Image (tube, helix red, strand yellow):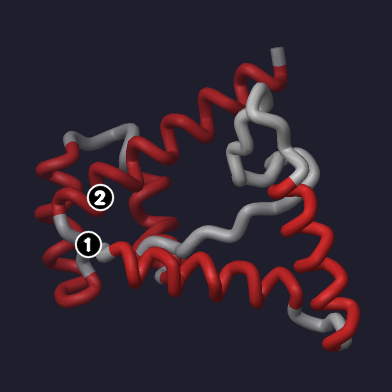
Amino acid sequence: MSKADDLKEREQWVLDALYGLKAGEMLKVLNHASLAILNKTKSEQFRGKPDTQKHQVRRRLSEIEKDPEVAAFIKSNAQHKEQAKLLRQMKVIFKERCPSQSALSRYLTKCRRQRAQIKREAD
């Protein structure tokens, strides 16, 4: 992703966060945010990322997450099969909806991290 594309995506994220406010309210929020950035001292490093506890960060859904049937199939079969076997079976069942090997790998990693997080919070 180019720098221009990244900035455009971030701009859209900000606009989405302001959605529903009146124009004057939007300007007040942007003004306060600008002042907060400018008022940071040199000893404080402004990170620019919201605290995920206070603000829900929106992220783009993966192609697997956009297809609930594929996601459910992966979740129900992932622990019982090797990744290569799972991918071969998915190619037969889902044909053009079948994710790539790298997408499947990323999704399985994400699922493992989520399970570990849930387990840590339960303990």
Above/below status of 38 relative to 72: above
- Local packing at callout 2 (Cα closer than 10 Å; few below 14, some 14-19, many 20+) is many
Q: Quadrant of the N terminus?
A: bottom left
Q: Amino acid at mark 1?
A: Pro
The residue singled out by tag 1 in the image is 99
Q: Residue at x 34, y 36 (%)?
A: 109
- Local packing at callout 1 (Cα closer than 10 Å; few below 14, some 14-19, many 20+) is some
Above/below status of 112 relative to 16: above
Taking the view exactly as shown, the residue that stands out farthest to the top is: 123
Identify the image quadrant of residue 13.
bottom right
Q: Position of residue 78 (x, y in %)?
A: 32, 40
User: CB of mark 2 within 8 Å of CB of mark 1?
Assistant: yes
Above/below status of 44 relative to 88: above
82 or 15: nearer the eye?
15
76 or 87: nearer the eye?
87
Q: Residue at x 18, y 49 (%)?
A: 102
